Structure formats: structure tokens, C-alpha cells
Image: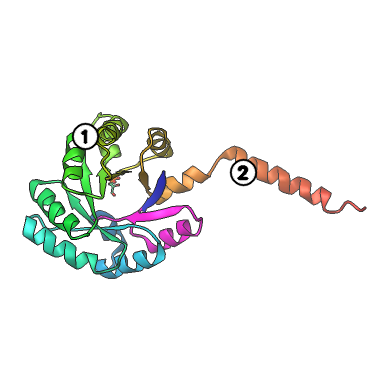
Amino acid sequence: MKIFLDTANVDQIREVNSWGILSGVTTNPTLLAKEGREFKSTVKEIAAIVDGPISAEAVSMKKDEIVKEARELSKIADNVVIKIPITPDGLGATKILSSEGIKVNMTLIFSGNQALLAALAGASFVSPFIGRLDDISHDGVQVLSEIINVYQNYDFETEVIAASIRHPLHVLQAAQIGIDIATVPYDVVKKMVKHSLTDIGIEKFLEDWEKVKNYKK
Ligand code: G3P
């Protein structure tokens, strides 16, 4: 499974990218608003840091306007992918854009049927929001399983991005069912690295090394 970072914070992206485990970044208007920076220059900077798909969201709602906006956004950098919410207009725009070679990440996916439609329209990625499903007492991971099942039945090439990840267990559950990508918030990816036994183990090794390094031949 590939790990994307779900943030528009350039410092966080640089830090996690330096670990050598990052394959892409997803942004959305909410994440960009947190940074208080101009949209296109922020996306351009992110696209130069990470060698992989960088999702930037189109905010137009009508098919022709979505297409126009997406074409503009795709000029920011070669690795920019256009996030489009699933609506009838969004599907129509995705069909046009995918035929032009512009990659679409169809977002705000909450069901297997929505994911099926996104794949039929030619989306390169779909983003089911599993945390938001859990928030309303639905099972987000179950919806991921449904999508994987549907896509395998028909050999769709659309990659599934588990999004709206709230904790490390979400990432593990996504990996266990073979999800292509998890887009993970910075605080969650930091928690994934940590284990108290690792910390205790390092402390003990360093303590013992202090004894060993002074031994003479
Ligand atoms: O890419 C955005 C998606 O992950 C949303 O997350 O936490 O706002 O539900 P959240």
C-alpha cells in the first residue's frame, strides 16, 4: 500500500518525505484554508517536493466550469491530479478530463455505487471518506471492502485512496484488505512510527553501548 500525506502544510510534507515512505499528497479546500496561503503557489511547491500524485480540488459545480478549472489546475505541474466531488456534473467532467489524459481523484465517496460510477467515468483515483462514515455510525472499512470487491470483479484500474483517516488502526485495516493507497494526516503518520517498546529498546541499546565502547582488546 502506498502512503499519501493528507495535508497542505509544506513543512509536514518535507519532513515525512525525508523518511522515504511518501508516494503522494492530497489537499482539499479545508486543508488549504488552515495554511492561510495562496492556493496555486502552495500546490506548486508541494508538487516540487513530492515525486508522486498531488491532489488539488476543483470547486466549480457545473460540468463545463469544472472542466475549465481542472484544465487550469493541471497546468500547475505534471503530477497534479484534480480532485472532483462526485455529482452528475463531476462525473461528466471526469469523463472529458480522463479522455484528455488529465487524472481525476473523485472525492467525497461514501458508497460502493459511487465508486463504481467514478471508475466508469474514468477516474484514476477514488477517495472514500472512512472517518466521516464512522462518525455517523456506519462502517467506513466495510465500504472500502465493498469498493475493492467491485473493482476486482471488473478489473477497473481506478486506485482506491482510503481518506478521512483518523487513527493508525484505520491505516492497518486498509492495508489488510489490500487498499491501494491511504492518505494519512501528519499526526497519524507520526503515531504509526512510534511504539513504546521501540523507545525502551533504543534507550537500553544506547545505555549498553556506553559500557561496550570502553572495553579494551
Ligand atoms: O482528503 C480529505 C479527507 O481525508 C477528509 O478528512 O478528517 O476532514 O474527514 P476529514
- Camera-side mark, 2 or 1: 1
- Residue 14 part of the magenta-drawn span: yes
Residue 184, how many percent across, how many down? Answer: 38, 47
Residue 27's spot in the image, x, y percent? 29, 56
Q: Which residues are magenta?
A: 6-28
Residue 112 badge: 1
- Drawn side of residue 209 relative to residue 169, left or right: right
- What amino acid type is highlighted by mark number 1? Gly
- Residue marked by disc 2: 199
Task: Please give left or right for residue 70 compared with residue 177 in the image.
Answer: left
Question: Which residue is at a point 77% across and 49% down the rendered structure image?
Answer: 209
Q: Is mark 1 within 8 Å of ligand 1?
A: no
Is residue 29 within the magenta segment? Answer: no
Which corner quadrant of the image does residue 13 belong to? bottom left
Mark 1 secondary-structure assignment: helix
Q: Which residue is depicted at the point 25% across and 55% down? A: 28
Crowding at label 1, few (<14), some or many (≥20) Cα neighbours within 10 Å?
many
Q: Amino acid at mark 2?
A: Asp
